[in-house]
Image (tube, rainbow, N blue to C red):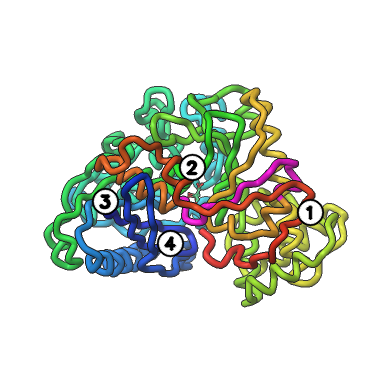
């Protein structure tokens, strides 16, 4: 049978991967060829990304892919909102700041007061998060912005290095809080009011756009001569949502589970009502003109930082946490105190419990259990909010991504939400990325992307109140994103 091969590069906050996807007959197989760690680099009082290090790993992964035969296309996705600035010659100007950098302290509050909460939300429909590109640009030194010619979000920057295109892809552009979900272009009035030079913002292209051939030097370095660069849904969450294995148009929600838990529904149109704004729901762009109406929940980040502080083993932590009884203390995981990195994360969790007059978790498993119970409870609250805002009942919850391997969190989520949780695929982001590329190449004709995902994945259902029959897997956050 005819197959085509595509390469997806998925950059997450804690790890990156380069994967080969083989598509044919309505099925996709994914083989991760190269994995590498990622994370913030504390430097000069701030926090930055090692983008050149990531680029080197990408080149390494592409070289490995070239050994598998002809590759039709390559595409990159990553976390949202962060960007590099290029000068007119395409030179990267300075570093790429991390969205958890302390440079953003207090900036959102200032800009919100200056421009007005209603005006910002009305123009963009994007949730107020302190790291949105809007606030990051407000934190820039004016000289750096003046020297810049083009702003490229992280996946766009890698696409530029791959093929020379200076464009931005729609799903990730929507996360900047500078994008107008009604016009599908930049929110120019807001851009002007924020003092951002219009010329900085590149042309917006659709997921699935052919960005051109590899640069000659990249083709020579990697051996990937004939491959095209095709923009997937470059926002990792958009790629993951594209690969949610749901059937039907409504009545279900998803959690894209990793470093963050992105909890939402797919909506045919943006929802910018007062109720949506009151819940600080976001309207990010999905593939095919859909809207990802969702909310950021702090996710496994808190556990990842605790684990780093303890230098402990995830499997042991989860086994210990699973053995503890229900009904322990809970925190609000979305409290801003948990946003910044730090080896004091366990102490922050304990302080939150103490501050709300609850028993204080002492041991690492107790702290992990507290965080997982809190995430499950928060997800349940967000589902209730989504039902109220959309007027549509949610009967099934799909959990995708690295965090969907965590049986304990899946069961706690089923219990807290009172809905069956369908877990998997683990590599939803890679699958969504690969299938948008494959569709652009005409290799999935006759199938929807979700048909192909369902035919190609093992899924596991967790029923509220019923402990999973088989042995618990303890791989929860080992490869979290
Ligand atoms: C998940 C994610 C979220 C975004 C956060 C920061 O990886 O992309 O969707 O809000 O990272 O960029």
Q: Is residue 102 magenta-colored? A: no
The residue pinned by badge 1 equals: 330
Say whether residue 200 is visible: no
The residue pinned by badge 3 equals: 1
The residue pinned by badge 2 equals: 241
Q: Upstream in the sequence, badge 3 or badge 4?
A: 3
SS assignment at label 4 = strand
Comparing 83 with 452, the one in front is: 452
Cβ atoms under marks 1 and 2 closer than 8 Å:
no
Of tags 1 and 4, the one toward the viewer is: 1
SS assignment at label 3 = loop
Q: Position of residue 57 (x, y in %)?
A: 33, 68
Does residue 464 sit above or below 341 in this rendering?
above
Cβ atoms under marks 1 and 3 closer than 8 Å:
no
Dot 1 crowding, Cα within 10 Å, few <14, some 14–19, many 20+: many
Distance of mark 1 from mark 3, alpha carbons? 53 Å
Distance of mark 3 from mark 4, alpha carbons? 46 Å
Dot 4 crowding, Cα within 10 Å, few <14, some 14–19, many 20+: many
In which quarter of the view is residue 358 placed?
bottom right
Of tags 3 and 2, the one toward the viewer is: 3
The residue pinned by badge 4 equals: 48
Distance of mark 3 from mark 2, alpha carbons? 29 Å
* Left or right of residue 431, residue 201 in this image: left
Dot 2 crowding, Cα within 10 Å, few <14, some 14–19, many 20+: many
SS assignment at label 1 = loop
Of tags 1 and 2, the one toward the viewer is: 2
Distance of mark 1 from mark 4, alpha carbons? 32 Å
Of tags 3 and 4, the one toward the viewer is: 3
């Amino acid at each position: 049978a005819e197959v085509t091969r595509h390469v997806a590069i998925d950059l997450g906050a804690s790890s990156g991967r380069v994967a080969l996807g083989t598509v044919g007959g309505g099925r996709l197989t994914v083989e991760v060829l190269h994995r590498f760690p990622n994370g913030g680099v504390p430097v000069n009082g701030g926090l930055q990304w090692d983008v050149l290090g990531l680029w080197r790993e990408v080149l390494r992964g592409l070289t490995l892919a070239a050994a598998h035969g002809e590759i039709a296309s390559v595409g990159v996705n990553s976390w949202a909102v962060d960007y590099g600035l290029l000068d007119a010659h395409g030179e990267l100007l300075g570093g790429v700041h991390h969205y958890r950098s302390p440079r953003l302290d207090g900036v959102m509050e200032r800009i919100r007061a200056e421009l007005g909460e209603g005006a910002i939300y009305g123009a963009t429909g994007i949730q107020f998060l302190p790291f949105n590109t809007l606030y990051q640009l407000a934190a820039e030194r004016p000289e750096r912005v003046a020297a810049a010619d083009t702003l490229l979000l992280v996946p766009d920057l890698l696409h530029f290095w791959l093929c020379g295109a200076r464009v931005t892809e729609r799903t990730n552009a929507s996360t900047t809080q500078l994008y107008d979900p009604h016009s599908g272009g930049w929110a120019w009035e807001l851009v002007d009011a924020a003092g951002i030079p219009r010329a900085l913002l590149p042309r917006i292209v659709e997921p699935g756009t052919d960005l051109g051939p590899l640069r000659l030097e990249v083709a020579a370095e990697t051996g990937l001569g004939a491959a095209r660069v095709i923009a997937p849904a470059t926002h990792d969450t958009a790629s993951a949502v594209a690969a949610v294995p749901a059937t039907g148009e409504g009545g279900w929600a998803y959690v894209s589970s990793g470093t963050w838990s992105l909890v939402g529904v797919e909506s045919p149109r943006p929802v910018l009502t007062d109720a949506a704004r009151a819940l600080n729901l976001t309207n990010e762009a999905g593939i095919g003109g859909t809207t990802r109406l969702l909310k950021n929940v702090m996710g496994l980040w808190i556990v990842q930082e605790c684990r780093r502080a303890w230098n402990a083993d995830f499997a042991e932590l989860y086994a210990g946490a699973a053995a503890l009884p229900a009904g322990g203390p809970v925190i609000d995981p979305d409290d801003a105190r948990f946003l910044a990195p730090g080896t004091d994360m366990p102490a922050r969790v304990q302080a939150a419990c103490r501050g709300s007059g609850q028993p204080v978790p002492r041991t690492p498993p107790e702290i992990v259990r507290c965080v997982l119970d809190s995430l499950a409870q928060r997800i349940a609250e967000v589902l209730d909010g989504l039902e109220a805002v959309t007027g549509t009942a949610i009967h099934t919850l799909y959990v995708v991504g690295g965090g969907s391997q965590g049986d304990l969190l899946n069961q706690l989520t089923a219990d807290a939400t009172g809905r069956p949780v369908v877990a998997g695929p683990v590599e939803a982001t890679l699958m969504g990325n690969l299938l948008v590329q494959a569709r652009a190449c005409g290799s999935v004709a006759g199938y929807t992307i979700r048909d192909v995902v369902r035919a190609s994945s093992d899924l596991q259902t967790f029923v509220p109140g019923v402990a999973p029959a088989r042995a618990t897997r303890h791989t929860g956050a080992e490869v979290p994103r």
